[in-house]
Image (cartoon, rainbow, N blue to C red):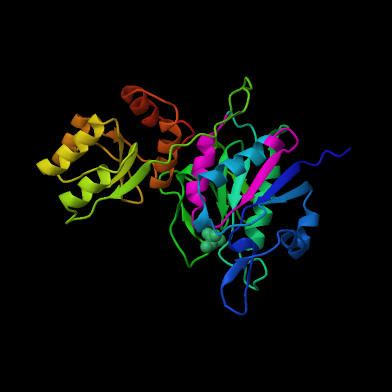
Amino acid sequence: MTNKPNILLVYTGGTIGMIKDYQTNALKAFDFSQIVENIPELEQLSCNIKTISFDEPIDSSNMNTRFYIDIVEIIEENYKNFDGFVILTGSDTMSYTSSAISFMIENLQKPIIFTGSQLPIGDLRTDAKENLITSIEIACARKKDKPIISEVCLYFEYKLYRANRTTKINAEQFEAFASMNYPPLAESGVHLSFSEHYIYKPLKDKKELVIRKKLITDVLILKLFPGITEKVVKSMLSIDGLKGVVLETYGSGNAPDETWFVTLLKEAIFKDIRIINVTQCNGGHVNQGHYETSVALKQIGVVNGKDITTESAIAKLMYLLSEDLSEEEFKSYFEKSLRGEIS
Ligand code: ASP
């Protein structure tokens, strides 16, 4: 018997567990068991660590909703026996994946920390060790016998973020992620200091964990740019079976107010396609109706994405589309915070 927390480490792939193939010079995934061998420091943590790896680890560019389901199934099967989960994925799509997992799990009472690294674990200057060790420490952290974190987070380069608030912003620097519209939940310096005020507090009356595995993928992201043509928008919105669109607009949610553009959106909404207005800016929020160029969007029933990230919007869209909601219900669920993704 031991009082040490049990942590499940799940390796899905990504640089953190990659080595260089000296023939091709490209990075490729290797046997996960070597990760633990590569970090003897893990033995010093006061927790029991069990590791699970995808049979065939993936570069996160190959991530898709089938793998999202694999991740939530691993958590579901092990939920009762573990106190926290650390999920290793490639950083490239980590914000998409971790956002989706946050919507797929309801009534979470334990920490799920996503992390990865910019350099492979065996590299001399690697960021992998710090990211991995501190993520495990965060997953173990308890106060008054309760986990400090009970939401889906992303830890990278000394900062813990709410996962569904993050975006990968840098392919070069160790500080690869930002959370422009929500402050970090913890920072790692000499001490690991949690900003308790910003951390999600679970409901007192414990509800059963709910795992949702149905996601609708007939969706697209339409990023506006000056010069976008009617032909392009029309053909995107006429895709057979299309159910939802994340419309990346300018500034505080503005788009061309030319008749052809508004008419195409209106026709799509009439065909029951849900359209979400999300800003292209990294920070700030959509305010439909603030400028003349967003009044029409509001009038025709475009959903206000407020300060949600594109990564989180696409995940929330896939999730809510699977719930068979009326247009009004969809709008009302989308426009409110379900997992802290909207202010
Ligand atoms: N291409 C890698 C991936 O996302 C990069 C990384 O691991 O950070 O899988």
Q: Residue furthest right?
A: 1
Residue 10 % position (x, y): 67, 49
Q: Is residue 73 left or right of residue 80?
A: left
Front residue of 320 and 308: 320
Q: Name the image quarter holding the C terminus.
A: top left
Q: Name the image quarter holding the N terminus.
A: top right
Q: Which quarter of the figure has residue 19?
A: bottom right
* Range shown magenta: 77-106
Q: Is residue 3 left or right of residue 213?
A: right
Front residue of 32 and 56: 56
Magenta stretch: residue 336 in it? no
Up/down of 214 relative to 91, above or below: above
Q: Residue furthest top?
A: 205
Residue 71 % position (x, y): 61, 43
Up/down of 204 relative to 150, above or below: above
Q: Which quarter of the figure has residue 57?
A: bottom right
Up/down of 167 relative to 128, above or below: above
Front residue of 224 and 250: 224
Residue 198 appears in the figure = no
